[in-house]
């Protein structure tokens, strides 16, 4: 009986624990573990983790968004986190972003197996795909009316709610560098969500979302500019007639893209008929004859860029694969048993879209002024959201240009063009359509990983070979923008490196001198010369050749130098307090007394080994010779330096002549001798004069010390930037893959690199 009761109790405890783990929200790491994907059906072996599942964004309405996280390999962690959104509106990020573009797998034509995408963005970052809004893909709402009332505003609010809960489920990504990216109508989603995150972060102390910037491709940006640019692209590429082009320019630009007039829609139909059976998303690519979802055949009343994403035959493979029960089970998807099959795009959501602001440009301006980074890229064969409209929109921002329009190269051929503005980088990809795939999947993450600067260099690097033209173009851009800190550190250390040579030479010369005054400088000068030589050599090599360890040594040495100067300045002020001398009545000059100075200075100057050197220097200074021919009148009317006052004459109070032997006088009076090599060099007044000269010179030197400290701090900051550049050259492109060989100075460096496939 007891054993039976114990068994029942154990079962009850286990059930309670299981319910707490699955139904509660307190054990977040366990919920994360429950979301982990063991292996997808037909998936090849991989060395990275995957998670997928639902996050509830509105418990009252029952809205939950589906996500799929593909982590970067463990070897390159911690890598940035990138949220990817597809547009439509109403299209799935799983169908397009994950399965056709930047995801880790592509789907085999049989619809049952997967193969590795060598250009997956998770090679350099953790990619979070989100099906948004509710009603798209596996994301759902238990309130049916939600599908008919969704628009831009709710999409952004729900996505932000998703992020807050998701970061609690994945606390390891809190404070990780975070970017938002997307394409097509995500040209609305991405800036709007970015604005919401940015504004929320401004009023939150230490926000967990470490938002750095966003990136959009072939993006819907501004209705007016997109209209004008699209019609211009159609006409300039010979897709429509002169008359249709002229009519479109009159009827459509003032219209809303979401609710255009009947006349504007009719003219778009005319344009579609004139284009014929082409793929509008990639006008030079062959069409998929079996596809039935091309926008130009299923417009449903929307403006062209409001359609689903690029629609090649591969979307059919996704529709087969993601409707397999075993796939949905592996993804932890369709847990509510949706009463419809999974589709790449929701016609209901796209058809009944509620709100769509006409322009995203005010958001761009706000975020650029807030210091966020923005990247915009366009495939130049897309006629749905063509680069012409994007260029008009960017020009409307009136940003200052940092690097002019210029080509970038891929394997010796032009890969596209780019222009870098203050706060925004625009890149075109030659021959790419609405979906910029393989090539972009290599250089766009390169820009994300380049998180230390808003300026990124668009280079398509997935194939070997770099042409001379390519090297010149990349060198020119890098020379102007990226290697400034390396230039400064390199040139500065080259100068100090050369300066160390005469310092060492001077030290060697002092060793040959018989005079104590010079010979005492031998060891300090030699030490300073060799330290400057080694530190400058490390800084020069590190900055010019991207040797991170050399720059690390350089920065440590600089830090020690700054700390040493600070301590020396403070110590100098502490020990040079007091002094200043006493004004002699009836005379211009002052006289100085050893007792007025700090005990540390008195002790040093009183020791024979120190005073012997100081005395030799005083004698070689020829200061006493300067006043040897002075008359008594000169002593009344002219000033004396501290050394002249203390070493070159007896104290003024001394009495010589008849009765002098009977008078009680200062000890220095008996030290005085008119011999040129004796004078008052053994007097305490001479030692006091030397200390006064040291005090005055030190106070002057302290001003230079402060200036030097400020300068060294600035150099140290530049050195830190150069060190980051060197580490990035070694690790970040892309996080350790194909590290750059150190073969030349940074400002004359070949930035061409290759991916191993």
Image (spheres, helix red, strand yellow):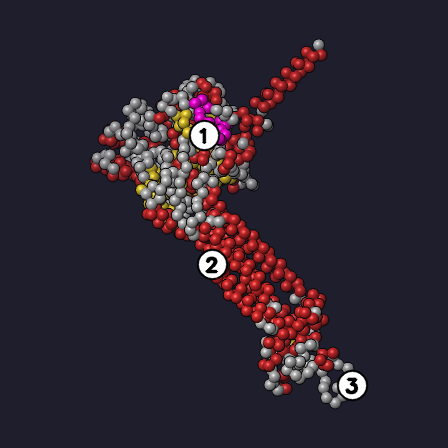
Identify the residue under disc 3. 662
Q: Name the foreground residue: 231 vs 467.
A: 467
- Image position of 298 with respect to 551: above or below: above
Quadrant assignment, res 226: top left
Identify the residue under disc 1. 130
Left or right placement of residue 517 versus residue 474 in this view: right
SS type, badge 3? loop
Q: Which residue is drawn at 63% across and 16% down?
A: 11
- Image position of 43 with respect to 634: above or below: above
Residue 179: say if magenta: no
Q: Distance between the residues labelled 2 and 3?
A: 68 Å
- Mark 2 and mark 3 lie on one chain; the one further toward the N terminus is 2
Q: Give the range drawn in magenta.
A: 40-56
Residue 277 visible here: yes
Q: Which residue is drawn at 41% across and 37% down?
A: 756
Most distant residue in the right direction: 662
- Image position of 757 with respect to 466: above or below: above
Image position, residue 87 (x, y; %) = 39, 31
Quadrant assignment, res 671: bottom right
Identify the residue under disc 2. 494
Q: How far apart are marks 2 and 1 (CA)?
A: 51 Å
Left or right placement of residue 223 versus residue 623 in this view: left
Tell how many labels.
Answer: 3
Q: Which of marks 1 and 3 is in front?
A: 3
Say few, some or many: other residues with alpha carbon within 10 Å of mark 1 (under 14 / 14 to 19 / 20 or more).
Answer: many
SS type, badge 2? helix
């Amino acid at each position: 009986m007891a054993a039976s009761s114990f068994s029942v109790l154990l079962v009850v405890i286990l059930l309670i624990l299981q319910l707490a783990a699955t139904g509660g929200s307190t054990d977040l790491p366990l919920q994360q573990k429950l979301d982990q994907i063991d292996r997808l059906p037909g998936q090849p072996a991989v060395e990275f983790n995957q998670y997928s599942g639902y996050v509830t964004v509105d418990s009252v309405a029952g809205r939950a968004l589906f996500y799929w996280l593909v982590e970067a390999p463990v070897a390159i962690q911690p890598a940035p986190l990138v949220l990817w959104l597809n547009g439509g509106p109403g299209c799935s990020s799983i169908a397009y972003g994950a399965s056709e573009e930047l995801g880790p797998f592509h789907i085999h034509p049989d619809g049952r197996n997967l193969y590795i995408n060598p250009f997956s963005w998770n090679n350099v970052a953790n990619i979070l795909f989100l099906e948004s809004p509710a009603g798209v893909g596996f994301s759902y709402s238990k309130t049916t009316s939600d599908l008919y009332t969704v628009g831009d505003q709710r999409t952004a609010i729900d996505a932000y709610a998703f992020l807050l809960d998701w970061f609690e489920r994945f606390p390891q990504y809190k404070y990780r560098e975070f970017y938002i990216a997307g394409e097509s109508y995500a040209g609305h989603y991405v800036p709007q969500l970015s604005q919401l995150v940015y504004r929320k972060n401004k009023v939150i102390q230490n926000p967990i979302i470490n938002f750095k910037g966003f990136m959009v491709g072939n993006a819907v940006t501004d209705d007016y500019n997109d209209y004008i640019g699209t019609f211009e692209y159609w006409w300039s590429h010979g897709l429509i007639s002169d008359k249709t082009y002229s009519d479109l320019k009159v009827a459509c630009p003032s219209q809303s893209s979401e609710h255009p007039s009947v006349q504007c829609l009719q003219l778009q139909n005319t344009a579609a008929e004139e284009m014929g059976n082409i793929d509008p998303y990639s006008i030079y690519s062959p069409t998929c004859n079996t596809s039935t979802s091309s926008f130009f055949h299923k417009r449903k009343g929307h403006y062209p860029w409001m359609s689903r994403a690029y629609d090649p035959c591969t979307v059919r493979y996704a529709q087969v694969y993601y409707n397999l029960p075993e796939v949905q089970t592996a993804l932890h998807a369709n847990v509510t048993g949706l009463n419809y099959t999974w589709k790449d795009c929701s016609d209901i959501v796209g058809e009944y879209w509620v709100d769509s602001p006409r322009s995203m440009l005010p958001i761009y301006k706000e975020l650029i002024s807030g210091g966020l980074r923005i990247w915009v890229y366009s495939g130049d064969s897309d006629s749905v959201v063509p680069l012409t409209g994007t260029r008009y929109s960017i020009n409307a921002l009136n940003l200052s240009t940092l690097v002019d329009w210029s080509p970038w190269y891929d394997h010796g051929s032009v890969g596209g063009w780019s222009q870098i503005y203050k706060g925004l980088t625009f890149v075109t990809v030659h021959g790419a359509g609405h979906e910029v795939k393989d090539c972009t999947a290599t250089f766009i993450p390169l820009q994300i990983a380049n998180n230390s600067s808003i300026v990124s260099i668009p280079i398509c690097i997935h194939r070997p070979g770099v042409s001379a033209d390519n090297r010149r173009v990349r060198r020119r851009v890098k020379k102007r923008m990226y290697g400034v800190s390396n230039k400064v550190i390199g040139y500065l250390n080259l100068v100090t490196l050369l300066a160390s040579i005469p310092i060492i030479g001077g030290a060697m010369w002092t060793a040959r001198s018989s005079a104590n005054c010079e010979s005492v400088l031998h060891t300090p000068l030699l030490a300073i010369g060799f330290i400057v030589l080694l530190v400058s050599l490390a800084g020069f090599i590190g900055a010019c050749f991207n040797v991170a360890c050399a720059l690390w040594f350089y920065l440590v040495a600089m830090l020690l130098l700054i700390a040493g100067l600070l301590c020396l300045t403070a110590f100098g002020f502490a020990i040079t307090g007091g002094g200043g001398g006493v004004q002699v009545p009836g005379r211009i000059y002052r006289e100085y007394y050893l007792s007025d100075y700090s005990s540390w200075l008195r002790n040093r100057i009183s020791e024979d080994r120190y005073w012997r050197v100081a005395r030799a220097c005083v004698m070689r200074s020829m200061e006493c010779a300067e006043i040897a021919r002075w008359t008594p009148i000169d002593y009344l009317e002219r000033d004396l330096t501290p050394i002249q006052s203390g070493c070159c004459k007896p104290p003024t109070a001394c009495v010589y002549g008849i009765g002098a032997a009977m008078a009680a006088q200062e000890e220095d009076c008996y030290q005085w001798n008119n011999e040129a090599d004796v004078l008052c060099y053994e007097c305490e007044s001479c030692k006091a004069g030397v200390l006064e000269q040291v005090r005055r010179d030190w106070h002057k030197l302290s001003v230079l010390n402060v200036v030097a400290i400020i300068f060294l701090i600035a150099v140290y900051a530049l050195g830190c930037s150069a060190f980051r550049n060197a580490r990035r050259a070694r690790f970040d492109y892309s996080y350790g893959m194909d590290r750059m060989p150190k073969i030349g100075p940074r400002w004359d460096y070949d930035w061409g690199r290759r991916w191993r496939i």
